[in-house]
Structures are given as structure tokens and as C-alpha cells.
Amino acid sequence: MELTRVFVYDFVMFDSFLAQILVLFLLYISALRIFFLRAPRIDAAAVVSPLAFMVSVISFFIWGFSIPNLALLVLSLLFFLTNARAIMRLSAQLYVDHYSIPFIIATLVELAALVAVTLFIVRYRPVRCVPSDFSVEKEVRAVSGNFANGFVFDDEVSEKVRGKISGYVTVYRPTERIEWISSDDSILNKPADGAVAVENSVKTEDFSSDKAPVALFVGTPFAPVAQYEPYFVMLAQKGLTVLAADFFPPDMTLFPDRRNSRLFRRSELLRMRFEEEENFEKLRKEIVGFSIKGYEALSRIAIVNFRKEDGSQRKIYYLTDGLDTESVFSFSDKFKSNVVGTMQMESVEEYKTSRFGFVEQTDVFLASKLGLKRDGEFFIPRYMAFKTVQRIGNVLKSERKVEDENGAAQEAESENNEEYNGEQI
């Protein structure tokens, strides 16, 4: 059984930072102990260096290649090698009365490097975003399958027919019932005391969150779902159910070597984006093709598995980033009866990091390369969520208007028929 089947991890960027802080803490214990040897004793602190190395390796396999993870991996390995003799003495339960000069010099050099890495990691730390703090429930579900045959939730099939995990679907839901207010200024806010004071608004029960469409998003190899999480949390806070998917099936190949691994794919694509832009654009065309297939697969998952309380199908609203209109139509036209609209995120002028996600919260180092700063107030995700629900609200208003007009027309036709029948009698 795959380890990922036992432990489906929630790839939160802030958790990566916490793991890095843990490694730094362990390395500081290892480095600073040279200043506190006052009497012969067993050097128990030597054990933290291999522990720090193990944590850095695990972090690398969970979150993949990044500059902080690589720096900590190399640094913890150096600490481990430097403390090899100390670890052997500890295993033999030998007392230590002093540290050798070469060991002290090596540790001081490593300590200086450790301080530099610490400053880098703290400066470019991601912004903490906890869904429950915004009355949002988050669920991560593994899927098996491929683009050719589709995907199925891994926990819905028997052990005998399960394949290798080939993606994750993250579901963001509001934990509180949200009433939809149809207004240009306030689309998804709870009315005070159940009253609606907005002019030309409709009854709130007509626009409950259960009747709202399901918002769908498919991440890319260089901008996975984790890079958009603040936006999805803000959308769910306003009453939407958001399905965000990362697919990595065997029939999705960008590189012929180990760079195609999920551990290295994003970092390699980002490197190409800034150093080999021509090659990056060639690959991006392939990524667009995979995104189209991903939206088709996620649409089928949403239609089958996410329905209204009465069992009927919910409408679909697409969230896309960096996909041209023709590409959007190529998959949305296949689900015409279910789709109510599309939000092309790059159409919002204030969103400056199109195709990369909300890096001002999730990847502050990348944001700095794009000329932006860390934003702990979630200004852009909040604004994007507002613009999105505003557009969805307008779609619902239009649909309701059409329904009312059709109802009025049918009522008028019925009255005319009754009058005609009366005249005939």
C-alpha cells in the first residue's frame, strides 16, 4: 500500500514554513551547545542533527524542491556529518569534557550559515491562512485515474481496483448558511436580523448557497491549488462551494526525465519562466492542453458527486487563470446545460500575478521577483472574491429575471386561453 493512501496530506504553504522552523530550531540546539559545555557529560544534544536531517528530507518529499527546502537539506546534512563522531560517542555513552578546535570552527561556520538561512526563511515566510478562521471547511480527497479514462475518488472504490494516486481534489465549503443578496454592492452577505434593506433586491431564500453554482478550478504544474488557497477560502466564506483540483496522472508528461516528478516540476518551470522564457512558452502550450483535460475531468466529478440537497444537479461556474477564451469554450461547451459562466481571473486589473496564483500570501519570494510585497491582509484575494461573487450574483439575477418573465408569459397565456374558452362557450 502506498504511503499516500495512509496519509493524504493537506499541502498548506504555511505548514511548510512551520516544518522549516522546526529544522532551524533543531539545528540551533546542535550549534549552540558548544557554548554551554561546563563539565564532562554525555553529549545528548548530538542526536538532534540526524533528527533535523530526517525532518528536512521528509519536508522535501512533501512540499518538493524550493530554495529554503534545499538550503535546509544541505545545511542539516552538513550538521549531520560534522556531528558524526559526536553521535558515535553518544551511542557508546562516552563523556565529553571539551570540543575539539576543528569541530568548534566548523560549527561556527555552520552557525553563520544557519543565521543567514533563518533570515531568508523568516523574511519570505508565507501568510498563515486557516480556513476555519473564516468559517470555511476544507476537505482534501485523493483521486485515481488518468485523462483518457477519467478519475474517481480513491475512497469510493475497493482496494482491488484502486490505482496509483493521480491527483487531489480540495473542497472548500462554508460552515454557516449564507443568504445571497442580489445587489451591486453586496452580493453574498448575511442580512441583519433576516431583513433585506437593499433596493430592488429579491427574497434571500431565493438565493441560498445551496442554489449557488459550484466553482471549479484546476491547478497547473507551476501554480497548483495551494497557490490559490486564500482566494478559495474567501469565496467559500461568501457562500460558494469550491472544487479545486491538482491532477498528475501518468499521461501528463512535460519532461522526459526526473524533472517531470512533482518534487521538481514546479521549480523547473519557474526557473524556465525567468531564465528560458521561450522554452517556457512552448511548454505552456502543453500545460494549457492538460488544463483543458483537467477541467473536463473535474466537471464530470462535480456533476456526479456534488448535488443539491434534493439530489438534483448543481450548476457549474468555472474559475480560470491564464486560459484564453477559445480554450475555455473548448471544455465549457461540452457541459452547456450545466455551465452558468466563467471567471477569467486575469480580466481583473488589480490581479497582478496571473498564472502564478496569490503569491503575495503563498510564495513571498516569487512575489518579490515579480515586484510585489507580502500581503498579510489578503487584500487581493478578498477583492477577487468580491468581484467573482458579484458576477455570479448577476448571473443568478439574470436567470431569475428570465424565469419570472417566462412565468409571467405562461400566466398571461393561460389567462388568454381561459378568456377564449369563455367566449367559445
Image (tube, rainbow, N blue to C red):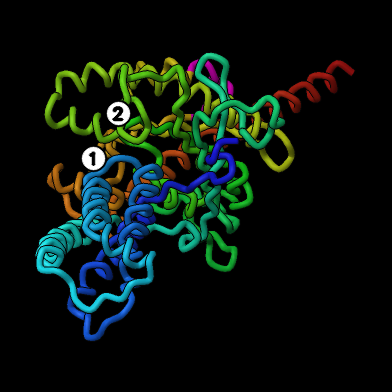
Q: Nearer the viewer, residue 291 or 69?
A: 69
Residue 414 as seen in the image, left or right of residue 102:
right
Q: Is 351 located above or below residue 148 in the figure?
A: below
Name the mark on residue 262: none
Q: Is residue 376 above or below residue 77?
A: below
Residue 200 at what x, y percent from top left? Answer: 49, 49
| Number of the label disc, if any, that sits on residue 353 | 1
Residues shaded magenta? 333-340
Residue 68 visible at all: yes
Q: Residue at x 26, y 51 (%)?
A: 77
Residue 266, given in percent of the width and then of the height, sits at 29, 33
- Mark 2 and mark 1: span between their CA atoms? 10 Å
Q: Which residue is nearer to you in this view: 20 or 285? A: 20
Q: Residues within 10 Å of mark 2 (few under 14, many from 20)?
A: some
**Circles 2 and 1: CB atoms closer than 8 Å:** no
x and y percent of residue 31 in the render? 21, 68
Quadrant of image for the C terminus = top right
Q: Amino acid at mark 2?
A: Gly
Q: Examine the image and state in which quarter residue 366 appears.
A: top left
- The three-letter code of the residue at mark 1 reads Thr
Above/below status of 404 relative to 30: above
Q: Residue furthest bottom?
A: 39
Q: Is residue 109 magenta?
A: no
Q: Which disc, if any, is residue 322?
A: 2
Q: Residues within 10 Å of mark 1 (few under 14, many from 20)?
A: some
